[in-house]
Amino acid sequence: MAAKAPRRGADLMRRVVQPPKAGSLVEAMRAIGYSLETSLADLIDNSIAAGAKSVDILFQDRRLGEPYIAIIDDGVGMDEATLVEAMRHGSSDPRSERATHDLGRFGLGMKTASQSQCRLLTVVTKRANCTELSGAQWDIDLIHQRNSWELEVLSDADIRGEGAAIPREVVDRLASLHSGTAVIWRRLDRLTESLSDDRASLAHRINETRDYLGLVFHRFIDGPARRVKLQINTQDVVSHDPFLSRDAPPWKVGEDRIDVQLGNGRSATIAYEAYVLPALSRLSAKQIESLTASGGLRRGQGFYIYRADRLLVWGTWFRIIKQQELSKLARIKIDVPNSLDHLWGLDIRKSTALPPEPIREALRQAVGRVQTQATRVTTHRGHVLPEKSALWRKVQIDGVTFRFEVNPDHPVVDDVRAKLVESGSLLLEDLLEAIANTLPYGVIYAAMASDQRPPTTMDIPDSALRQAQDRLMQLCSKGFTQQAAIEEIMNQEPFSNYPGLLLKLGGGAKQ
C-alpha cells in the first residue's frame, strides 16, 4: 500500500486567539439572573470566607445624595496585589479542591453579582495592623468605551483625598476596623429602574432582602458555631429557621447518610434529616410569620439544601412528588459538601441545584416517610386518635366521592341521644345529617391552604368542662377507676384538644 502524502500547510488545522468583546460580554454577564437578594448573599459568602464576624449593608437613598449600596465586613482584608487578582473574572478554578468551609466556586461571584446590580463596582480593603487602604474598581461604561477589561487601581487620594467620589461614611467605617473589606455599588441602574420615587418602595425591597438573608444565613446568625452578625442600615437581620428548631422543635421522622464515590479513592458523604413541623394550630403568629421567609407553610415544604451551613435551595421536592396541602408540614434537611458541587449542578448564583440520580433514589424513600407523617399531623391537628374516639369521620361513598360526618357512635353523641325523648332523638339525627350535607369543603380547604391558623384550643370552654365532668361520672359509675376514666376521656375529641383539661379533672400532669 502506498504511503499517504503529507498534508500541505493550507490543509492543517489552525488556532486563532479570539477573545470575547469586553463590552458585549460584560452586558451578557449582567443578565445571568441575579436578584438584589441573591447578589448580596453572594457577597456575604465572600465575607464569611474571609473570616468576618460582622457584615453591615448600607443602602443610601437618592434623597441623601448619589444612591449607593455598600457591604462592609471585618474579615482579613487584602493587600493590593491580592485585591487586583480577586477582581479578575474567573479568579479560581471550579474544579480545584477547596477547604470544606469555602462558600465560593467559580471565582465570579463578587464581580458578576455586583455588576448585575450596578455599573460601577468599587472594592476598598484593609489588612490587619495596616493604615493603608487598597482599592480597585470595574467601570462598565469604561469597559464599553475602551472595549477592554481595564481595571482601575485606586490611589490613596482616589479613596480618601479631597473630592474623592467614594462615600466618606464607608471609608471611615472601614478605616476604623482592625481589618476588613468594603464593596460599593454605584450607578444602580437596575435597582433605580425597578423602584418608584417614594421611600416606601425602597423600604419594601430592604425588608424583602432582610427576610431573604435571615433565611439563607440563619445557621450563621444563631447557629452553634461560625456566628456572623448581619445588619442592614444598622438594624439586625433576624434569623428565620425554616425548621423552627428552637421555638417549636419539629418531629424528626428519619435520618440517613449517603456515601458518594469521587474517584481516586476519595469519597464524600451527604447527610439528611426528615422533619414534620408542629400542627398549624400549635404555632404562634410569630412563628408562622417567620416561615413566610421560606415561602410559608405550603410553598415552603420540601428539601432544604445546605452547603457549608449556607442554605442554597428550598421549597422543592425535585419532582419526586408534587407539593400538596397535606404535606405542607414536611421538610427534609440535606447537608452537601462543596466537593459535590459538580454533581448537584450548582450554578454561579448558588440558587439552583439538582440531586444526581443515585442520590435522588435514596431521597425518594425519605420523601415517602415524611409525607405520610406530615399528612397524619395535618389531618389530625397534631395528634392521632382511635377511630371510634374521633368526633368526625370520613365516609367513602364511591371510588372518587367522600363526605365527612359527625361520628354517630361517638360517646358525646351517645350521651346526648340518651337524654332525649324519641322526638328529640329524631331531630338530633336530622341535625347531624344536615351538618354533614352542608359542610363547606371549599371554604375550609381555602383557609387551610393559606397560612392562617385555626383557633387555638388551649383555653377550655365551660361547655367542654361540663361535658367532661359528666362523662367522668358516667364512666366511674360503670366501674372505671378515676384515672382510667380520665385517660379514656382525654383520648376522645373534643377533650383531647384541651391538654389543660387533665388537671381540672384531677388526673395530674400529662406525660
Image: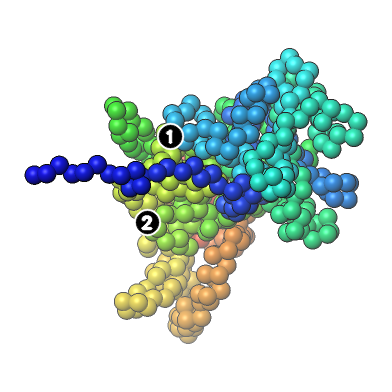
Residue 368 coordinates in the image, percent (x, y):
35, 53
Residue 474 coordinates in the image, percent (x, y):
45, 59
Q: Is residue 200 above or below residue 441?
A: above
The CA distance from mark 1 to mark 2 is 29 Å
Disc sitting over residue 268 in the figure:
none
What residue sits 83% from the left and 59% below the top?
A: 197
Q: How many marks?
A: 2
Viewer-proximal residue, 21 or 99?
21
Name the element at disc 1.
loop
Q: Amino acid at mark 1?
A: Arg
Disc sitting over residue 320 in the figure:
2
The reply to whether residue 506 is visible in this rendering is no
What residue sits 54% from the left and 56% below the top?
A: 297
Residue 439 coordinates in the image, percent (x, y):
51, 77
How many other residues sit within 10 Å of disc 2, few (<14), some (14-19) or many (≥20)?
Answer: some
Disc sitting over residue 95 in the figure:
1
Name the mark nearer the viewer: 1 or 2.
Answer: 1
Mark found first going from the N terminus, 1 or 2: 1
361 left or right of 36 in image: left
Q: Is residue 78 above or below residue 237?
A: above
Viewer-proximal residue, 257 or 463?
257
Name the element at disc 2.
loop
- Render colour scheme: rainbow
Residue 30 coordinates in the image, percent (x, y):
62, 51
What residue sits 58% from the left and 43% below the top?
A: 216
What residue sits 35% from the left and 36% below the top?
A: 257
The reply to whether residue 196 is visible in this rendering is yes
89 left or right of 114 in image: left
How many other residues sit within 10 Å of disc 1, few (<14), some (14-19) or many (≥20)?
Answer: few
Viewer-proximal residue, 235 or 412?
235
82 left or right of 63 in image: left
